[in-house]
Each structure stands twice: as C-alpha cells, then as structure tokens.
Image: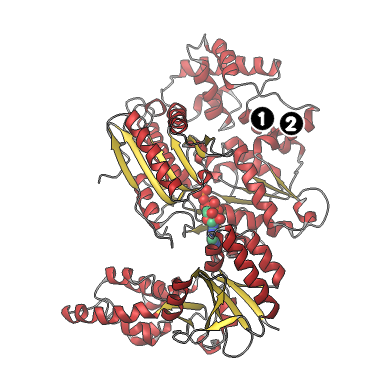
Amino acid sequence: MPQLAIAKDFLTRYARLEKRLQRAVDDALDKFADTYYAGGHLEKVTDARDSRARTLRITQGYRGVVLAPDAGDTYLLVTVLPHDDAYAYIRDKRFSVNQALGVLEVRDEGRLEVLATALAPAAEAVESRLFDHVPDKHLAQLGIDPQTRAIVRLLPDESHLDAISGMMPAAQHNALVALSSGMTVEEAWAEVSKDLVDPVGPEHIDPDDLATAIRRTPGEAVFVEGPESLREMLDHPFDVWRTFLHPRQRRIAYRPSYNGPTMVTGGAGTGKTVTAVHRVAHLARRYADGPPQILFTTFTTTLDAALRAQVELLIEDPAQLARVDVRNLDKVAYQVLRKERGRGPDFPKRRELERLWDEAGADAGCSGAFLLSEWEQVVLAQNLRTERAYLAARRRGRGSRLGAEQRKRVWQAILAATARMAAADQWTFVQASAEAADILERTGERPYRHVVVDEAQDLHPAKWRLARALAPEGADDLFIAGDPHQRIYDHRVSLGGVGIDVRGRSRKLTVSYRSTQEILSWAVGLLGAAPTTGMDDLEDDLDAYTSPLRGRRPTVRGHRDRASELAALADQVEVWLGQGVEPGSIGVAARTEEVARRVREELAGAGIATCGLTGGEGVRGGTMHSMKGLEFRCVAAVGVGADLVPLEARVTPAAEDAIAHGHDLQRERNLLFVACTRARDALHVSYAGEPSPFLPRS
Ligand SMILES: Nc1ncnc2c1ncn2[C@@H]1O[C@H](COP(=O)(O)OP(=O)(O)OP(=O)(O)O)[C@@H](O)[C@H]1O
C-alpha cells in the first residue's frame, strides 16, 4: 500500500500562501494523490543533493518538494516554496535517519560544507575547541554522524555552535547543546531521548527506512490516511496543532490515565491550551452516550468561545462532542444554584453593590469597595465562617493593616451587607462559586467525571473549591493548565490549600510555538528577577523556555508626549498593513481603558478601522488584561511609560504593606509580559515621557 506523509513545514507554509496558490497546491495534490504510487507527477532534479528529493509542479512560479523513496512506496510532502527556493532547497538539503534516535532528520549540507571550509582557519587559531573532551564514541552514542562530527570537531566555542543550529539536524544539535552545557553523555542522552515516541536501540535503526523514521517523528511529519484526511488538514491549515503535537504534548494529553489531579505548566505560547484541548478529546473518547461527563473551563467568558471552537475542531464525532461542556465556572455556579433553589441568582453591577456596601461600611469607617473586596479576597478566599476565624486570619496582600477592634467592626459590616444582599437575592460571582461548592459538598452530588481547567493561575480560591467539588476524587478528576508567570489578578492560589494534590503529576512544556525567540527573550526580561511560586507551592522558572521561530527584535520607542506616541503608532500600524498583515492579526494593548480608547480614536482618525480585541472588523485594540489567551501576528503595547506601568492606583504603597507592594509590582510586570507574548512575529513597544522601570535598559 502506498503511504503518504505530510511534514509540518509543508502545512505551515501552505497556510501562509495566497488563496490562489493554495488552490493550485490542492489541484496538484489531487492529481498526485490519484497516482502517487506511480510517482507520475514528480520531477527528478539532476543536481539534487539527495537523490530521493523530487519537485511537484504547483504553478509556473511554485514547487512542492517531495521525498520519494528509492524503493518502496512512502512519499513525504516536505515543503512548498517559490520555484527558485524549491530548487535551492533540493540542491542543498539531505535527509537521513538519526542513527541513535531513529528519527527523520534534514540538514543543509550545502551551507554546512561552506561553513566547514570557513571554520577551518578559526579552528586552527585556537588552542582548544568546544568538544575536544568528548570522544567520538560518545558523539556516536548521541546520534552525531561522521559528517556532522567533522564540523563539530572544528567548533571553537558555543557561539559557533549556536550559529549552525538552523543548518544541522535538530536532534543532533540538541545533543551537542546538552554536551556543551556540561552534561555527561548519559545526561545528554536522557535529554535528547526524552521526547522519543518509542525508545529504540541502534540495532533496530535502518538508515533507509524513511517510513519508520517518520513514525518516530510525529511532531514534524505524520502519515495521512488518504486523500480525505489530507484534504481535511489542508482545509484548516492554521490549526497545525491538531496534527503536529510535540511528543511531550502528546504524551501528556494522551496518557491513558492519571491517578489524580494533573497539572501542566509552561511559559506563554508553549501549547498548554492545545494540550488541554487534546486531553479533553482523549477523555471524550471514553463516552458514547449519557450526560456530559467532561467540563472544560476557564476563568472568563471571552475565552470560552475560543476554547469551544478548538474543541469542536478536534472532536469530530458528535456523540463524543456532546459529552463535553465548555463553560466558565461562573456559569457552572449559576447552574448549581438554579438547580438547588429553583431559580438562578441575580448578579447586579459592581457599582450597584458597592453602594449597598458603602452604607453597611459607614459604621466601620470603610468604603464599600474596600469592604466588598475584603469579603471576597479574605473571607470567601479562605472560606472563613466565624468572627473568630476572621480575627485570626492572615490578610496577605490586603494593604492597610487592621487592628482587632477594627476587624470586629469590619466583620459586623460584612455580616450586615451580606444579610442585605441575601434579602434582595443579590450575588457576586465569587460568592456564587463559594455557595455552589458548599452545595455540592453537602449533597455529595458530582455533576462531572472530569474537569479540565485552562488559565488556572487566575482562578479565585472559591472557584477552585467549586472545580474540586464538581468531579469525584479519583483517576483523571482534574487536569489543570496554567502559568504562574502570567498571574494578572490577585489570586495566589496554593492548590494544596484547596485540597488538590498534584505532587508527582506535574508536567512542564518549554517550547513556545507562538512568539519568536527574539520576542520571547525580550519579554522574559520584563518579569524581573524575583522568584515565582507555582500553584503547587514550588518555585517555577522559565529557564528552558525557548522558541524554534526566529524574527526581528522588538522595537521600543520613547516619545515626547502621548499625541506623538499615538501618531507614531498609527504609522507603525500602516507599515504592518502595508506588509500585508490582516487588520485582525494586529493587536494594540494599553494598561488603561482610557489609553485604549485614545488608541482607537487615533487609528480611526488615520483612516484605520478598529474593533475590540475579540471580534469585529479591523485592527484590534483593548486593555492588557483583555489580551489574555489571545494571539496576534503583530502587537503594539502602548503607554508603557513610568506614568502607567506599573499603574500606581493598583499598587499597595510599600510603607503600608511591603509584601503586598512586592506582589502588586510583580502582577504589573506579569501583565506587561502577557500583553507582549501575544505577538507571533512583531512586537512594538512605546511610551511617552519616561520609560516604565520594567523595560530593559537599552
Ligand atoms: N505542537 C505544536 N505545533 C505547532 N503549533 C503549536 C503547537 N502547540 C501549540 N501550537 C500553537 O502555539 C500557539 C500557542 O498555543 P497555546 O495557546 O496552546 O499556548 P499556551 O501555552 O496556552 O499559551 P498562553 O499561556 O500564552 O495562553 C497557538 O497558536 C497554537 O496553535
């Protein structure tokens, strides 16, 4: 049976082609698919470096590159490129099977040859070279083949190793990076083999067996079952994640079962959401009928729609799809309350509630806003039921200190306000979650079997208690995805504190598929040096966080005043639009509503259509908070000056509470990090007056 495989690069390049060219690719593939066992439409190229490489004619100006075996019947669609680039590719690239790992690899042999000649004098000039201490035997054990070894022996230092990363097979480069960082050969092997789909021994590796090598490399190339599944893939080219999960993501998502709550962490864009969506699909396969068994949830309604769209793309079987509820926890709490009480709770506007709380707070000498947040952030967060418990509670992060007498008055005011809310049947969302969790605890009812939580770092403890109570404790009860570096609200939850134990079941993703390395390295600098505590109470770092994507460094521009900053923003947006970036792929973020509004006015004044961050026609604009969970090709972060970032009104003064001050500053840093890491290809940061102290000094 002939076998057809498609490489990730083919799909990602196809996604970026104009519609006209995509149609031409479709036609060429249709013809090819009809007869591909004969290889009839493929063209052999006389000066091809790898005799198995062929071109597939798409149009006069475009070619597909196909790898065709000498014998057998496996074809790999490698990439699709403008005519000359395709021929240059075929002249320079060679494919091989890694002799230690068994995975498919590709190298730019043309450039490596040039480099070897150029490196020879530099290698002569130094006394010792980077890998002098590593015997050939160890290099071979790690899959470094003789050709690569010849170059490796010439490398004077790590900067040269970095420089050849795009030319040599990725797995071999990873092994060398591991060795150069001081690892032993055993440690380096553990590092490079950890993403293997199936462990292999060299004795089982056939250098000519491309089909098996492709099977061992599902993050880069996969077999398609036939023309229909190829069509299906090409119909959704931007959804590369549906097919090409990184082996680590796949292992986490498709592990048959976990014997308790599981957590996935990782920097922005490492595919936590994607992994969670695949986990949902995996769990859904268990159920053919009955009520929904899986809740997929996150903390805002705006993200619900995006998650639902992804789930619908991935789960094709309507019966399985019907077993999944995608909704945020506020809606779930509403349903639990409605079922219990026969009617749903009413959630008045925050301002309205604050007025009610203002009245209750008059005696205690506190504003309604302060009291309301004291209730939600201390009382409901810690589930305090009595005055005694409140008097003894830690009020971490709450700013102003309260003496015992003052606390008693605050407690009384809270009782009075909550009684008035109860009489009017008014609720806050946090309170509804706390109440729903209590109801489930009391009744023992468990509406779901599995709860999958995305953006977990920002859930209020009451919502965690609800999440915990929604599914019975046991295998696969909770699957949690989040990044503590992206905390942008005040909830610093310890999962242990809400009865969720993820010890031994915590996994980390480190490769960013969204932002380029240039954007990522710059953005990590915004986070500062303070250690971050993860949701499991352990320290979390972004040390191994990298991106395979390369691009331009972010630009940072200072301006005299806001008017000139915004005028320059309009120019920048024009440049992006002129480069062919779709308006909806440009996102502009500001720290405050006020600046976000001025941005939209300025762009509209310059004749550029704008809309909110999540929908509509035009360039998208909004606050940094509402950027969470989104992504854009180009991002402009505006107003990143000392006047707005950090936003003084949101930072507890150090004199009042030093710990709260530190937390608030970190949260402001995280917020800027979140906004900047929404960018895939380009990031532009600007300010008026003095720069934000968070910006790296240039
Ligand atoms: N294995 C993969 N191959 C290609 N693209 C991927 C892969 N995994 C994720 N992506 C893409 O990378 C981007 C980021 O993925 P995702 O939103 O899941 O990351 P995240 O870790 O949840 O990000 P954040 O924490 O910033 O919200 C998306 O465009 C997604 O489609």
- Residue type at mark 2 is Leu
- Residue type at mark 1 is Ala
Q: Are marks 2 and 1 in contact (CB under 8 Å)?
A: yes
Q: Earlier in the sequence, mark 2 or mark 1?
A: 2
Per the rendering, the mark at residue 432 is 1
Left or right: 457 as drawn, with respect to 578: right
- Name which residue lies at 50% across and 79% down: 101
Q: Is mark 2 within 8 Å of ligand 1?
A: no
The picture places residue 439, in percent across and down from the top left corner, at: 73, 34
Total numbered labels: 2
The picture places residue 602, in percent across and down from the top left corner, at: 43, 30
> Does dot 2 land on a helix, a strand or a loop?
helix
Q: Quadrant of the N terminus?
A: bottom right
Q: Nearer the viewer, residue 54 or 112?
A: 54
Q: Establish if 618 lies above or below 417.
A: below
Q: Establish if 620 lies above or below 405.
A: below
Q: Establish if 34 lies above or below 468.
A: below
Circle 2 residue: 337
The picture places residue 227, in percent across and down from the top left corner, at: 70, 71
Q: Establish if 420 lies above or below 671.
A: above
Left or right: 266 as drawn, with respect to 451: left
Left or right: 2 as drawn, with respect to 199: right
> Does dot 1 land on a helix, a strand or a loop?
helix
